[in-house]
Image (spheres, grey):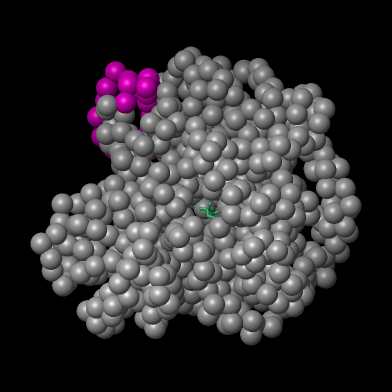
């Protein structure tokens, strides 16, 4: 790892002064799904604990072995056979819950759909029949590039039902990003829509798919949902959802799959340019998402109305819109659009309208709402809320307290949930009926998970010290590997500390032994709660003819957590990036990676700081981007370069 000094010494000392702590409301604690004894029970018999959680699901055939551990490869619930879609749908209908609302969907323009579990079962069955008819078989990969509409959920569950492996690509990603994921996964079907509504207008999706599949013969068919009714190009490869799916029989007999049968691939950015296809399998994954959704949100499926504001294109949507909540027979609110359309109170309007009791969103959104002003949420009745969650990046204490006060009415527990695409499910989080939450702390590993903070030699640090978070024991929803690249799986996660899983985050144990997550320590940036690799953005920049070399860093940003700052050496020189070129380069990165990866700022430099082995020292560039005194430059080939850069950029922000 090039640059693995925890970036957040300042954060760390600020956080040390944070002494607020909020005990759970008495009524919630008394009636909580999970009480304090769960920690001890799980610690005393960890595998027995996970077996008990697996029994929350319906298995067609029980497992023989709970865990088979050949580090770093794990097999959970071997011998067991299970179908994820049956667990999310049929099982609840069979239990007499067919009339319960599964999806309460709200379109951005204000159109709505209410889908019961019985209806969802019919929709999933039809889609499963259609997939089979389109030639999709067990083990095949299916790409899903969709807006936030119920058909997206249906498509995922239909894949799971027939054992096809879904690969959802965030609808905001570009043609190229979609294309490289199609290449890597070799998907044979793409499910998409004409478009979706975003920021008050119909935003097209089909053209990106047209572009991506044009020279990719591995894609046999493109299945298109009509959402916006906008004009689309049409080829022989395309079929309409309403013609091929909605005409199918609603009868479909599911087959159970092995517990370790692949359920999905989700691509995430790593420290190199190539995104990693994170592989999740069925039984263990479903066990942990189901358990954590029930435990961390204290879900009471009969009465709760649950809303996770993430996009299904990210892992949060997979685990906590689809598989966790639906496996628990929850009523799930799903919203298509942006938080400021048609007005900045949209989220609070949705909570008031559907009497949402549990809400889950990202710190970047919370900070945006803070900026928009307290008076906006104050106009709405948010008293239905009883647990509110945060995910995606460290939540700063101020944002936590604002969330608790202004959204949670000053008494609703905030659960700050730490996990990753790779962990599949929540790993570190308060339990709302047990934990006295501290603003900014994810607190403790959930029952059944063994997390620790270690120093650079892998030794556990004492309370009060900082270091790197690690996971000591395998967990049911852990990634099973990187699609097509087992070596990279070992190198990335299991080589830094012998025998320990290293997620790449810095962390701190406070005097009580509670955990504070401090952000990435590698070359991955966290932009609005999403991993973006520095290398990927750099590669995009240098693919532009005007850029000779580029280095990007994530600089602290009040709203997005980190903002991308790019340092570029221009071909033909230049001390400044002209304004029109700034726009051109930002758009260039947007086209190759997606708008989320556009640099917020671009600075021209004569040279980049490099170590003797040629690695860019991003740490020093981050110092500049964050207006700090530049740190230790002793390993640079030429230590004067930082003076040159700093002089040229007296104030980077
Ligand atoms: C990285 C994983 C978890 C799903 C969404 C992001 C950061 C996530 C927290 C949190 C501090 C957090 C970590 C992690 N992160 N949640 N509650 N506190 N940091 O998934 O794209 O795989 O990103 O997000 O740095 O490693 P992802």
Q: Where ligand 1 lies, by quadrant?
A: bottom right
Answer with left or right where residue 303 lies relative to residue 417: right
| 588 in the magenta segment | no
Q: Position of residue 597 (x, y in %)?
A: 35, 56
Is residue 623 placed above or below 505 in the rendered structure?
below
Answer with left or right where residue 511 lies relative to residue 625: right
Answer with left or right where residue 557 lies relative to residue 214: right
Q: Between 431 and 112, which is closer to the camera in this rendering?
A: 431
Q: Position of residue 362 (x, y in %)?
A: 53, 61
Quadrant the C terminus occupies: bottom left
Q: Residue at x 47, y 15 (%)?
A: 135
Q: Quadrant of residue 89?
A: top right
Q: Position of residue 353 (x, y in %)?
A: 57, 58
**Count of numbered labels shown in the rendering:** 0
Is residue 189 placed above or below 430 in the rendered structure?
above
Q: Quadrant of residue 35?
A: bottom right
Answer with left or right where residue 93 lies relative to residue 154: right
Magenta stretch secondary structure, dominant: loop
Q: Residue at x 13, y 66 (%)?
A: 573
| 221 in the magenta segment | yes
Q: Which residues are magenta?
A: 216-241
Q: Residue at x 78, y 54 (%)?
A: 447
Q: Between 495 and 559, which is closer to the camera in this rendering?
A: 495
Q: Residue at x 64, y 81 (%)?
A: 16
Is residue 245 placed above or below 198 in the rendered structure?
above
Q: Position of residue 313 (x, y in %)?
A: 47, 45
């Amino acid at each position: 790892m090039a640059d693995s000094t925890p970036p957040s010494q300042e954060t760390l000392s600020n956080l040390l002064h944070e002494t607020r702590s909020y005990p759970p409301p008495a009524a919630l604690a008394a009636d909580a799904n999970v009480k304090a004894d769960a920690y001890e029970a799980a610690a005393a018999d960890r595998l027995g604990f996970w077996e008990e959680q697996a029994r929350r699901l319906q298995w067609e055939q029980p497992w023989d072995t709970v865990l088979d551990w050949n580090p770093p490869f794990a097999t959970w619930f071997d011998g067991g056979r299970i179908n994820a879609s049956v667990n999310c749908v049929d099982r609840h209908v069979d239990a007499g819950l067919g009339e319960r609302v599964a999806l309460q969907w709200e379109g951005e323009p204000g159109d709505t759909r209410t889908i019961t579990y019985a209806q969802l079962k019919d929709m999933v069955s039809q889609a499963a029949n259609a997939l089979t008819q389109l030639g999709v078989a067990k083990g095949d990969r299916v790409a899903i590039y969709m807006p936030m509409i119920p058909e997206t959920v249906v498509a995922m569950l239909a894949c799971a039902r027939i054992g096809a492996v879904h690969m959802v690509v965030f609808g905001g990603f570009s043609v190229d990003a979609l294309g490289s994921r199609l290449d890597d996964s070799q998907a044979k079907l793409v499910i998409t829509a004409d478009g979706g509504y975003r920021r008050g207008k119909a935003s097209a999706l089909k053209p990106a798919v047209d572009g991506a599949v044009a020279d990719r013969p591995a894609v046999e068919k493109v299945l298109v949902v009509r959402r916006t009714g906008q004009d689309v190009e049409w080829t022989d490869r395309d079929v309409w959802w309403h013609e091929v799916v909605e005409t199918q029989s609603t009868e479909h007999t599911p087959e159970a799959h092995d517990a370790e049968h692949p359920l999905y691939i989700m691509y995430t950015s790593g420290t190199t340019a190539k995104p990693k296809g994170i592989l999740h399998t069925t039984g263990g994954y479903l066990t942990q998402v189901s358990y954590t959704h029930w435990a961390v949100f204290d879900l009471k499926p009969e009465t709760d109305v649950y809303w996770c504001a993430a996009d299904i294109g990210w892992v949060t949507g997979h685990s906590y819109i689809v598989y966790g909540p639906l496996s628990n027979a929850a009523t799930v609110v799903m919203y298509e659009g942006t938080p400021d359309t048609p007005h900045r109170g949209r989220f609070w309007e949705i909570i008031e309208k559907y009497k949402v009791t549990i809400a889950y969103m990202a710190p970047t959104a919370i900070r945006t709402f803070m900026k928009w002003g307290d008076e906006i949420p104050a106009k709405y009745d948010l008293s239905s809320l009883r647990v509110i969650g945060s995910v995606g990046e460290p939540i700063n204490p101020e944002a936590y307290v604002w969330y608790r006060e202004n959204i949670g009415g000053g008494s609703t527990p905030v659960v700050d949930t730490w996990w990753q695409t790779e962990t599949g499910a929540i790993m570190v989080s308060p339990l709302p009926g047990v934990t006295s939450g501290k603003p900014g702390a994810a607190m403790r590993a959930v029952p059944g998970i063994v997390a620790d903070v270690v120093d650079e030699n892998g030794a556990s640090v004492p309370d009060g010290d900082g270091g790197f978070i690690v996971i000591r024991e395998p967990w049911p929803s852990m990634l099973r590997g990187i699609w097509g690249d087992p070596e990279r799986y070992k190198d990335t996660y299991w080589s830094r500390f012998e025998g320990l899983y290293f997620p790449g985050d810095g962390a701190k144990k406070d005097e009580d032994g509670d955990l504070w997550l401090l952000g990435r320590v590698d070359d991955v940036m966290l932009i609005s709660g999403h991993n973006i690799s520095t290398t990927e953005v750099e590669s995009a920049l240098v693919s532009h003819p005007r850029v000779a070399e580029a280095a990007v860093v994530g600089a602290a940003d009040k709203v997005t957590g980190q903002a991308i700052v790019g340092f570029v050496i221009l071909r033909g020189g230049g001390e400044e990036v002209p304004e029109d070129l700034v726009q051109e380069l930002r758009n260039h990165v947007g086209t190759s990676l997606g708008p989320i990866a556009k640099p917020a700022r671009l600075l021209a430099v004569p040279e980049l700081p490099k170590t003797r082995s040629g690695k860019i020292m991003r740490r020093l560039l981050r110092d500049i981007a964050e207006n700090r005194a530049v740190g230790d430059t002793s390993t640079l080939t030429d230590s004067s370069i930082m003076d040159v850069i700093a002089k040229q950029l007296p104030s980077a922000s």
